[in-house]
Amino acid sequence: MSLMASYTVIGGPSSEQLGRKIASKLKSKYIGSELRIFPDGESKITLKDKLKGRILVVQSVYPPVDSNLVRALALVSEARRYSSHVYAVVPYLGYARQDRQFLPNEIVTISLVAKLFKAAGASRIIVVDIHSMMALEHFQIPAKNVTAIQELVKYFKKLNLKDPVVVSPDMGGAQRARNFADLLGVQFIALEKHRDRKSGEVRIKSGNHHKVRGRDIILVDDMISTGNSIVKAAQFLKKQRCGRIYASCTHALLIGDAEKRIKKAGVTRIISTNTIPGKTGIVDVSPVIAKAIV
Ligand code: R5P
């Protein structure tokens, strides 16, 4: 007899494939959703079956961020009508980077997002490799971060890399990169990145890193958005005459021509997870999410 509780898993419009995989890992019923967008931009979601039991709503909040957020909240609100156990599984949570005031009078929007999930009826929220744990402190429901690092490391273990070194593009991501390096059993370094808070411009401030000469690099970050952080880090490392450069992240937003610019900067390959579907999203996070649920 299985001791696993039974769930109903809703795959929201942004996370259908991942929702299916999570349902299969939990041996639970999967319910898909159909999205219609009206000419004025409103979303209308229709569920493909009836809801019951403990319900998981799987819906990443990537671009269009505001629309995907409203869709997540609508699904949670609908689920709450049928269950008092509604888990919001938001593998990529947009707005998480707005977790504190960087400049005076800025609005900390994650605080509103946190209130909205509670108001919609979520009893808990599960995210993957959130930008900072501070974002989760705004939630007044149990909030859990799960990491995809071990899954990404499993992938890199299969590659035949030359004396690899793990590099964090900034000090803020140093602990993440250190964990990645420890699991892979290799060295790590962190670069010093400066981002202008007004213009968004990124600069790498570090001096020479002779440690990287001739060695393959794995750049590790939580997310790639415009690609500027990875581009600057790759250009810096290439000047230090490193070997091949791989970029690994959990969430690959790859806005605009980010992928093209990253490749042009000398990155051989980008490897990310399926928190955001796309051609780089080859590492599956459903095992770690399913494990966090049971
Ligand atoms: C910043 O601290 C984050 O960890 C990422 O490095 C950053 O958000 C990536 O953004 P972009 O690709 O636009 O540089």
Image (cartoon, helix red, strand yellow):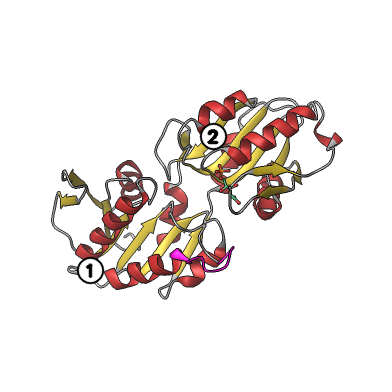
Q: Position of residue 291 (x, y in %)?
A: 45, 56
Taking 133 as reference, is 59 left or right? left
- What secondary structure is the stretch in magenta mostly built from? loop
Query: Which of the image's four quarters has the C terminus?
Result: bottom left
Taking 218 as reference, is 252 left or right? left
Is 105 covered by the magenta stretch? Answer: yes
Of mark 1 and mark 2, the one earlier in the sequence is: 1
- Residue 271: mark in rendering: 2
Residue 269, compared with residue 109, is above or below; it is above
Taking 46 as reference, is 185 left or right? right
Is 51 covered by the magenta stretch? Answer: no
Q: Position of residue 87 (x, y in %)?
A: 34, 64
Q: Secondary structure at mark 1?
A: helix
Foreground residue among 177 and 54:
177
Q: Amino acid at mark 1?
A: Arg
Is residue 157 visible in this depiction of the protein? no
Q: Amino acid at mark 2?
A: Ile
Q: Which residues are magenta?
A: 101-109
Query: Which of the image's four quarters has the N terminus?
Result: bottom left
Q: Residue at x 74, y 32 (%)?
A: 237
Foreground residue among 93 and 64:
64
Q: Residue at x 48, y 58 (%)?
A: 96
Q: Position of residue 259 (x, y in %)?
A: 51, 30
Foreground residue among 115 and 89:
115
Residue that numbered label 1 is attached to:
80
